[in-house]
Amino acid sequence: MQPAQFAFARYDVRLDSETDFVGWRGAARRLALNEVRPEDINWHVAPGSDTADLPAAPAGAQLTVPRDFITHAETASCHSDPDRFAFLYRMLWRQRIEPKLLAIASDPDTRRLEAMEKAVRRDSHKMHAFVRFRKIGEGSEERYVAWFEPEHFIVERNADFFVRRFTGMRWTILTPYASADWDGERLAIGPGAAKGDAPAEDDTEALWLTYFENIFNPARLKVKAMQKEMPKKYWRNLPEASLIPDLIAGADEAAKDMIARMPTTPAPHHARVQARHWPKREPAEVPDDDASTISELREAAKGCRRCPLWRDATQTVFGEGPDNAKVVFVGEQPGDQEDLAGKPFVGPAGKVFDAILDDAGVDRQKVYVTNAVKHFKFEPRGKRRIHSKPNAGEVQACRWWIGRELDLIKPDLAVALGATAALSLLGKAVPVTKMRGRVIEREDGLRVFITIHPSFILRIHEPADKEAERERFLADMKQVKRLMAA
Ligand code: URA
C-alpha cells in the first residue's frame, strides 16, 4: 500500500559516514515500508547527518527480507562504489517480491553483490597481511603506528582483528578515510589521515629488512605471483618492499650465483639459515649485579648475554608487576608478540591467562608475571618465527634473573606455569601432570604451586576437551587465590 503523500516524493537520504550501515538499514526499512521506489531516492554520505526526517514506518507494517541479505549487504556496504547504498536498496526492494533473488546466480544484481563482497574480503585479507607498524616513542610513550591504503571502507570491520593480534601494544592504523586507535584497553575509530602523519622508519625495521634481503631466494622468484599477492600499491608501505625492485633486477645474476654456490646436500635446515643470516649484534659486557630494585634489575637485564638467545631476539622481556607482589607467576619464555612488545604474556596465551585469572578473581595488576627465560627462542619459517622450546642450559643461564627477581620481590608464593617454569623454580625436572595442583616448598621456604602452561589450552582442538581443560586451569587459579590469602 502506497501512502499518497509520499508516492512521488524524491528523498535525499544523508548517512553519517561511509560505513553507516546502521543508518542505511534504518532508512531503507522506513522507505521500503512507505513504498518509496529506488529511483525516488538519492543516497549521500554527509557526516553529522541523520535520517530522522524520513517518514516513519506505518504502524504495524512489517518488512520481510531474507535473513542472509542483511549479512551480505553489511559486507558489500564497505565497498568503495559510490552507488552502493542505492544498489543495496534496489536489491532490498526487489526481494520483497523475489525472495529467492540471492539464490539466482545468473542475476546481474546478485552477481554484483557477490563481487562487491569478494572485493571487500580480499581487501581485508590484504590489510591483515600488509599493515606494518613502526615504533615511535620509548618507555611509557612507546606506541606503534601504521599507514595503510585500503581500496574499500574496511578499517572498522578489521580493527578487532588487530586488537586480538596486538592486544599488548598501543597502536594506531592510519588510512586516508579513517583511523583506528588501540590504547591497550579501548578501541577508537577516528578520522582519516595523511601518509606524512605516520612515521617513516624505526629500528625494528632495519632488522626486518636485513632478514628479508637474506631469506630472499632469487631462484624461486615468481614476479607475477608476487605482484598478485602483494600488489605494487602496498609495496610503498612495507619496509621490506623497498628492497624488491633491486632484488628482482638482480634476480637472474643472483640465481646463477646461488646455483654455483649450492650445496650438494638438501636445503639447509632453518637453524643454519638462521645462524647464517640473522644479523649478529656485538656482544656487550655481562651487566653488573648491583641492582637493588626491580626496575634497576630490568634495566640490567636489557644487556643480558648469559646465553646466546639474546642474539636473535628483539629485546629482553623482563617480568612485570608490583615489586612487592605476594605472588609471582612464571611462564616459559616470551612468544612472538611478547618479543615485539617487550612485555610478558600479551599474546594469545596471555589472553587465555588473563581471562582465566579474571574469572578466578585474581587481579593481574596485583601479581608479578615473568618468564623462566627472558629472550624469545624461535626458528624462522618464511616470514614467521616459530616458538622453539628453551633447553636446560638456557633455563639454567636465566635462573640467575629469576633468583634475583624473587630475592627483591620476596613473594609468599610462586606459580610455575608448565614444566620449564617448574624446572627453573625448583632446579630439577618435575612431572607437571602428576604434580599439578600441589605446592612444593623450596629450601628457602618459598612455596611453589605447580600447574600447566595456559598455551596448553590453546593447543586443544576438541571444544569439549578445551572447555574441560579451561575449567581445570580455572580451578588451579582459584586455589592460587586461596593460597595468596593464606
Ligand atoms: N608464553 C610464556 O611462557 N610467556 C609469555 O610471556 C608468553 C607466552
Image: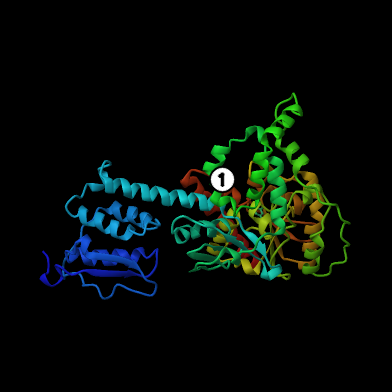
Q: Is residue 192 above or below residue 88?
A: below
The residue lying furthest to the top in this view is 264
Residue 263 x/y as whole percent: 75, 27
Residue appearing at x 73%, y 31% in the figure: 258
Q: In this view of the protein, which residue sits in the foreground, 478 or 137?
A: 137
Q: Is residue 401 left or right of residue 86?
A: right
**Quarter residue 429 falls in:** top right
Q: Above or below — where is 59 with respect to 333?
A: below
Q: Is residue 347 above or below residue 385?
A: below
Label 1 Cα crowd, 10 Å radius (few <14 / some 14-19 / many 20+): few
Along the line of sight, which residue is nearer the eye, 293 or 275?
Answer: 275
Residue 226 spot, x, y in % from top left = 56, 40
Give the residue at x 72% y 58%: 203
The answer to whether any part of residue 176 appears in the image is yes
Picture quadrant of ligand 1: bottom right
| Residue 391 left/right relative to 366 | right
Estimate the x, y position of residue 383 in percent, counting from the top left.
63, 44
The residue shown at (73%, 46%) is: 390
Q: Is residue 264 left or right of residue 176?
A: right
**Of 227 and 134, which appears nearest the observer?**
227
Q: How is the image coloured?
A: rainbow
Name the element at disc 1.
loop
Residue 434 visible in the snapshot: no
The quadrant of the rendering that contains the C terminus is bottom right
- Front-lying residue, 135 or 408: 135
Across and down, in percent, residue 313 comes to 73, 51
Question: How many numbered marks appear?
Answer: 1
Q: Quadrant of residue 167?
A: bottom right
For the N terminus, give its image quadrant.
Answer: bottom left
Could you tell me the amino acid type at mark 1?
Answer: Arg
Residue holding disc 1: 459
Residue drawn at 51 percent across, 65 percent down = 179
